[in-house]
Amino acid sequence: MDNSKIKNIIENLRKELEYHNHKYYVEANPEISDFDYDMKMKELQKLEYENPEFFDSNSPTQRVGSDINEEFNQVKHKYDMLSLSNTYNEGELRDFDNRVKKLIDESIIYVCELKFDGTAIGLSYKNGVFEKAVTRGDGVFGDDVSNNVKTIKSIPLKLKGDFPEEFEIRGEIFLPKKVFEYLNKEREELGENQFANARNAAAGSLKMQNSAQVAKRKLDCYLYYPIGENLPSDSHFENLQHVKKWGFKISEHVKKANSIEDVLEYINYWEKNRAKLDFDIDGIVIKVDSLSKQKQLGFTAKSPRWAISYKFKAERVSTKLLSIDYQVGRTGAITPVANLEPVLLAGTTVKRASLHNADQIELLDIRVNDIVFVEKGGEIIPKIVAVDKTKRSENSEKPGYITRCPECGSELFREEGEAKHYCKNEYNCPPQIKGKIEHFISRKAMNIDGIGEETIDLLYKEGLINDITDLYNLKQEQLVNLERLGEKSAENIIKSIEESKKVGFSKVLYALGIRYVGETVAKKLSTHFKNIDNLQSADFDQLINVDEIGEKIAESLINFFSIEKNIYIINELKNNELQMQLSDEVISNHSEKLKNLSIVISGTFEKYSRDELKEMITINGGKNTGSISNKTDYILAGDKMGPSKLEKAEKLGIKIISEDDFLDMIK
Ligand code: IVH
């Protein structure tokens, strides 16, 4: 086939796939099956692979993201990315209306919009082609997160219709509620920290360094603010209808209002109905519709005078406190939890609320049978914010705080400066035993697949595991007989446990769950002491002499190795042939060539990944730091080093080295 024909097929496939993307992700009205879509995508991928001369960074194939870790370049916003000032009640909103009317002598039309609770983004387009996506940053400079944003399927990479040559459009990237719930559930199963709310999850996802991972997060984006010299209309409302035709996702709930009364009606409606939306909103945005009037009104230093937000109050209901339970966490920390008479709040039935700690109960003066006010702010877990003392019965009494662990009965302690009480019976208290095992098998530790919290619960109940060493004595037959586990899963679990014997020493050290020994400290310790015996026999002074190991960590290590049970665990792990020392290969690569040197890595590299380079710095005695300061010795710079970093490096006179220079240094 001749080249122009191939080019034609490629271009048509791209158009077709973008069309179906829009149908699926923007209009929620797909025309073809997922299978047909995948087939077309595969065909395009194949043609692009075979004909690299037709590469296009905005092809639908580029939305899958890339595995290259990258740092974000900082770029200056063409128009400052300001925020909105907030109002919280009708009076403040009327004040806004009066201020507008004072400056503009004519009648005012407002546009009411939902205030999406996500993270702001500015998208630039040139000649109908996606150019870049920049976060708010400090409002003047933001991070260029284009590669991550390209993975969001509802954002068009090529526009349709009659768009201006150059313009920007701002909007909010968010995670739909369902996706957020799924993501948090998955993180819980993996033993990772959960996101407090969908906003944090969206912002965190957008800043991930690996766009292929971002693609999996299923972010979405509503656009609400086109900016540019040649927008089609003087009406913001009309412009939104235009940009919708160009391919952007615009909320269907945008509404014009002829008076502040109409605005209040809109606010009232959404205050009552927001739980029905499948994404979070935290208020309403009110904008003057006419762009020329917007111009007349202008901006203050921080926000436009032509727009304002009305923030919803956190939803609050009252209900009866039935009893208080005490939960024991993985670390032995005690959290009091209120059992409530079930009540509907923000679309879900609430039965429990966290009481945090003893001080909180004291502060709120909460008693069983009280009528309490429960609020749901931006966070998933509702909280008790106050007690309705007018409804308190005369004979109610202050609840005494428990003195013994509700799980194992041992005495509770509260150390000075700590907000929480702790159960210190770490090896005999069930939630602590299970917590240690969960940490041990988690992805960043031994990475044992196929076992979640529920399976650990089951194995513990059946008496099959009591500590981490028991994992290595599990037999497939024992697992198959457990409820819910089939032959295949049992086999996978055993395989994965066996595989974990190859996991490197520093991860094993981290997996032991020694207090204050996180991933980085575990790396430092393993590099310095080389094996567990050396570490075990190190005294306080030897420990604090290691770079970045302070007194708190040293004390914790000494305490850990003074406990008989821990020595037993270490011996058992050794008997099971886990890696309790650095491998010969790692040791032979060790050197002190970068001793006392602090190196910042920036950009993308050809030969090694950023993680590999970081590892090389550490095993050669150097220190890898994230940001440039006057303590930085070198900047290891790859492609696409951020201009602001470059400027800072030059200002401080720090030497910039290439990947090859670096490899020469450690040769
Ligand atoms: S318009 C000049 N419209 O809320 C400011 N912002 O607290 C133009 N937001 O910075 C912003 N929904 O990140 C606008 N419909 C909407 C919005 C919205 C959410 C965010 C945005 C803004 C912040 C202000």
Image (tube, helix red, strand yellow):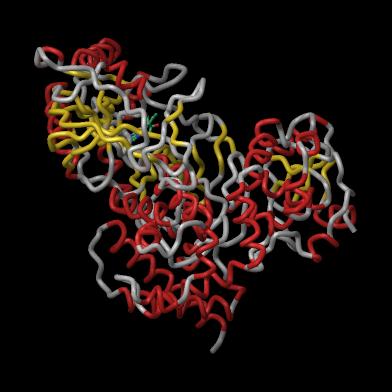
Image height of 316 relative to 484, above or below: above
**Quadrant location of the C terminus in the rendered image:** bottom right
* Pick the front one: 571 or 369: 571
Left or right of residue 566, residue 431 in this image: left
Tally of numbered discs: 0
Estimate the x, y position of residue 329 in percent, counting from the top left: 41, 41
Can the viewer see residue 118?
Answer: no
Q: Is residue 417 left or right of residue 617?
A: left
**Residue 623 place in picture, x, y as percent:** 77, 42
In front here: 475 or 335? 475
User: Residue 480's quadrant in the figure?
Assistant: bottom left
Q: Is residue 106 left or right of residue 456?
A: left
- The percent coordinates of residue 144 (x first, y second) are 56, 45
* Rendered location of residue 179, percent (x, y): 33, 53
User: Residue visible at 47% across and 40% down?
Assistant: 425
In the image, 175 versus 6, the foreground residue is: 175
Whether residue 643 appears in this view of the structure is yes
Q: Seen in the image, is 666 located left or right of residue 229? A: right
Q: Nearer the viewer, residue 29 or 626?
A: 626
Q: Quarter containing ligand 1?
A: top left
- Pick out the residue farthest to the top: 102
Q: Is residue 80 above or below residue 149?
A: above
For the N terminus, the image quarter is bottom right
Residue found at the far bottom of this picture:
1
Identity of the residue drawn at 33% across and 55% down: 182
Which residue is found at the position 57% from the left and 82% from the top? 3
